[in-house]
Image: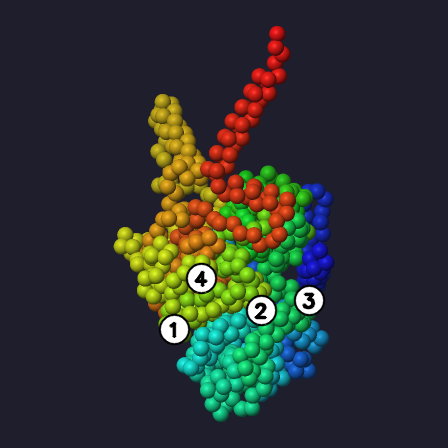
Amino acid sequence: MTFHRAGLLTTSALLLVGMAATTSSAAGDAGFVLAPKAKPETAAKQTPEDNRQLRRLMADRNDLFLGGEIANREFAFLVLPSEMTGNAKLVLDLQSAISVAPERSTLRLFVNDQDLGSVPLTSGASRRVEIEIPKGRLQPGYNSLVMLADQFHRVDCSLDATYELWTQINPANSGLSFSRRTGEAGSDLSSLLTFGNVNGRTAIRTIVPKTGTTNDIDRTMAMVQALAIAGQLDRPAVTVAEQPEANPGIEMLVGTFGTVRQALGNAAGELSEGIRVSTDPETGKAQLIATARTDEDLNQVISRFETDSHQHYMDGTSQGRRAMDNRRGRLLEPASRTALSTLGFISRPFLGRHYDQSIAFNLPADFYPGDYGAATLNLNADYAAGLSPNAKLIVKANEETIASVHLGDGKSGRITNQHLPIPLNKLRPGKNIIRFEADLTASADAACDAQTLTSSTPRLHVKADSSLDMPVFAEVGHSPDLAVAMAGDFKAGANGNEPVPLYVENLRPASLGAAATLLARTAYLSGHVTPVSTTGQWPLQRDGALLAVGTFAGVGRHSQTDMLLDLSPSMDMSSPAASKQPSTQSPASLTFGGEQPDAARPAEPENRVEAYIAWAKGFGMSVVDRLHVQAEMLNLVPNPQVLAADQAYQMPGNADLVVAQRLVADRSPWTVIAARDEAVLQESVNAISQSQVWSGIGGTVQAFERSGKPIERKEAQHQELYETKPLSLKNGRLILAGWFANNSLQFTIAQIAAAMFLGMSTFVVLRRGRRKP
């Protein structure tokens, strides 16, 4: 609990310092009103562009797209000790939509929870803004940058108009500029980690010479994973080359003295056992070499680096560590209470019409989902009077609605410790996302006069002391489940030191790079390295786990017979257009269930008899649908979304990437990542590494477009359970409850059997208990 309390204090500091100009003084039970601003906002200094190098934020265009009426972002960035003596500034290249009202819209900036200034958001061409960071604000190691955007529409008060508000920060021209950086090279791990940012991803180029062995590949895979943990690299992009290149990025070479000399030639210089780091600010290239005289000594070097990797990112400020923890997602334990502020939720009064905020957290890889319990969201919030009758706050867990709170009662109110259950079957191992969405339209929005446009009265304020309670949940491994694999468990409870066989057809560099990217991503999330044993031969035995990465052609000829996984495109689904049809409804109507358009409304019945007939038809159809759903749950009729263990999977024709896990024997989950070709494989693996895509990977088979857009997902009809912790009575009871919750037919049979046994035993007791005359 100490860890959570520290996060709460640091986030509270942000609220106290950063929100002093905008937070409200709470009124009585009727709600809240804004207090006057404590001081006028200071406009950001704008200076001409200079030629100093930028340390770009580890973010892509999606991360730096600030859409809607409010947007909150937090990023961690690294500062070297040598940079503390010079000057530092924050550089932003931004552009806002034409609809944004410049007189009210601002971007507030905080460094380590200290107010750095405010940037007015003006529409038009992109512009460069530079803000000096006062001395003493930064510390060596990781620091935090928080962006709070408030965007108001010029003339429109409708819900749809909120989607016209955006500000795009260009990641290529935005970041931190240090006067002491140019021309200085570092030789430690921190210096290395300031390199490699290419389009918001950490570019890692591993060198595996032609003479390299599979042992060299295995060690390289372990080093890449350890580096991802040490640098908290949430989106690594790994490639494999046979010789060094001059391109920017982090270049990694792992091998004995002989291997390193073969790869680098004279550039290897004098070698010594350990880790050697070199950087070149002029070319943007950094190099990490792990070497030793013998294979055994090299294994020890890698093992020490893996151990030390967990301590590196602890350097810096508490705010910097908070930013990294929240980006990865904090791990929640059973029977824990965590404030939303600890999970990265920034609480501030909201003046707009469409509220959209989210938090993320991780659950252990052996978390067992099922409808046998529920987490509890303890909600504290204030809302304003005058909201429309359909105003409501919707809470979603992993994009599934789990609660709706009505706000349109005509008067202001306060929600105090309202308990909203989150069923455990809506959560998953690994990363989870809880989203808050609210429709806050009011009757005054229809007129949309100047007073409404410039109103400073908040409509909703979700409080920072809202919390999330996790119950005691079942902890047991289960497969097949891709969510478990993406959380870092490919082995189904096998010995932790035993490597996972990694199949890559002909050990092709592009497929090896995709495999390394996948493993680095899982290592970042799980915090541990998955040892692998790389091979170019498909295994003949089915007595253990397997991870296979390659193309449809290379993997498909084996997977069809061994895994019932047909990776030849089906002809009836060959048109990609089917999955790319745009929605005919606006986002607002899709989210909040707005009225149907006139063309979609059924015709009004002409008399009462027709009305009764229409009602009876609708009632009958709903009963049939409900019975069909129940029959699918009981496996009495085929469910198109469920894949039986003996059922083959046919890949849709518009799939560019397939991720699958199937059991080929007891405790033998085989996981496959395959794409159309090697170029698509690398692109698609990078695409699914995005947080919002990764957190949706699950089931037994999932197909994607190359952009990471999901096409279809199949769930496993049955899962195999395996022990990950010593069995206890409490955990055993929860596992049994979860198993019954996930196997409805067996649960129904058990209920019937229990009822029959109870009836028979009661009959016997009553019969024997009668007095004989």
Q: Residues within 10 Å of mark 1 (few under 14, many from 20)?
A: few
Q: Earlier in the sequence, mark 4 or mark 2?
A: 2
Q: Which mark is residue 172?
A: none
Where does label 4 land, which residue? 546
Amino acid type, label 1: Arg
609 vs 773, left or right, is left
Q: Residues within 10 Å of mark 2 (few under 14, many from 20)?
A: many
Where does label 3 land, which residue? 318
Q: Nearer the viewer, residue 33 or 301?
A: 301
714 vs 410, left or right, is left
Q: Position of residue 646 (x, y in %)?
A: 37, 48
The reply to whether residue 707 is visible in this rendering is no
Q: Earlier in the sequence, mark 4 or mark 3?
A: 3
Distance CA(mark 1)–CA(mark 3): 43 Å
Mark 2 or mark 1, whichever is nearer to me: 1
Q: Position of residue 419 (x, y in %)?
A: 63, 42
Where does label 2 land, which residue? 229
Q: Nearer the viewer, residue 401 or 163?
A: 401
Where does label 1 land, which residue? 508
Q: Earlier in the sequence, mark 2 or mark 3?
A: 2
